Image (cartoon, helix red, strand yellow):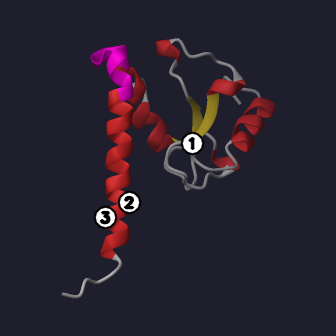
Amino acid sequence: MGKYSEKQLREIFDSGEGVCFYCGKKLVWSNYGKLGTRGAWEVAHVHAKSRGGADTLTNLAPSCIECNRKVQDRVSIYDNIRKYFKPSLWPVILIGGIITLIAIVIKRILNRFPTKF
């Protein structure tokens, strides 16, 4: 079957429970590498090989072909934070994100209840 044995492909496919690692789309086992077919998939490196990721089963995941090709070699959000922000700012960024998330949740909860004045 190419780069990976059928046993390895089965382990990778099963590790992702038959869905794309990135978008959650249902994949079809028999459509491995068949671009243009329903549920077509290929093996994705969770941490890109070009960025030091290993070719081990713990770093491999099933991905629909569309997602895997969009993601190819992109820098993760974590890598961007490391590159552009000093480590001393990470707690501030994290706290800011948590506060923003809490505000969004509160707003959605409040929007469910009509106000009467």
Amino acid beneath label 2: Val
Quadrant occupied by the N terminus: top right
In space, the residues marked 1 and 3 are separated at their CA atoms by 30 Å
Amino acid beneath label 1: Phe
- What's the residue at 53%, 11% (across, down)? 52
Look at the image and give the residue range highlighted in magenta: 82-91
Q: Secondary structure at mark 3?
A: helix
| Rendering quarter of residue 43 | top right
Looking at the image, which residue sits at the far front?
117
Residue 41 in the figure: left or right of residue 16: left
Q: Main secondary structure of the magenta part?
A: helix
According to the image, label 1 marks what residue?
21
CB contact under 8 Å: marks 2 and 1: no
- What's the residue at 37%, 36% (across, down)? 95
- What's the residue at 46%, 41% (across, down)? 67
According to the image, label 2 marks what residue?
105
Q: Which mark is residue 107?
A: 3
- What's the residue at 62%, 35% (across, down)? 61
Q: Residues within 10 Å of mark 3 (few under 14, many from 20)?
A: few
Is residue 43 placed above or below 34 in the rendered structure?
A: above
Can residue 76 be seen at all in this image of the molecule? no
Q: Secondary structure at mark 2?
A: helix
Q: Position of residue 115 (x, y in %)?
A: 25, 83
Is residue 26 placed above or below 62 in the rendered structure?
A: below
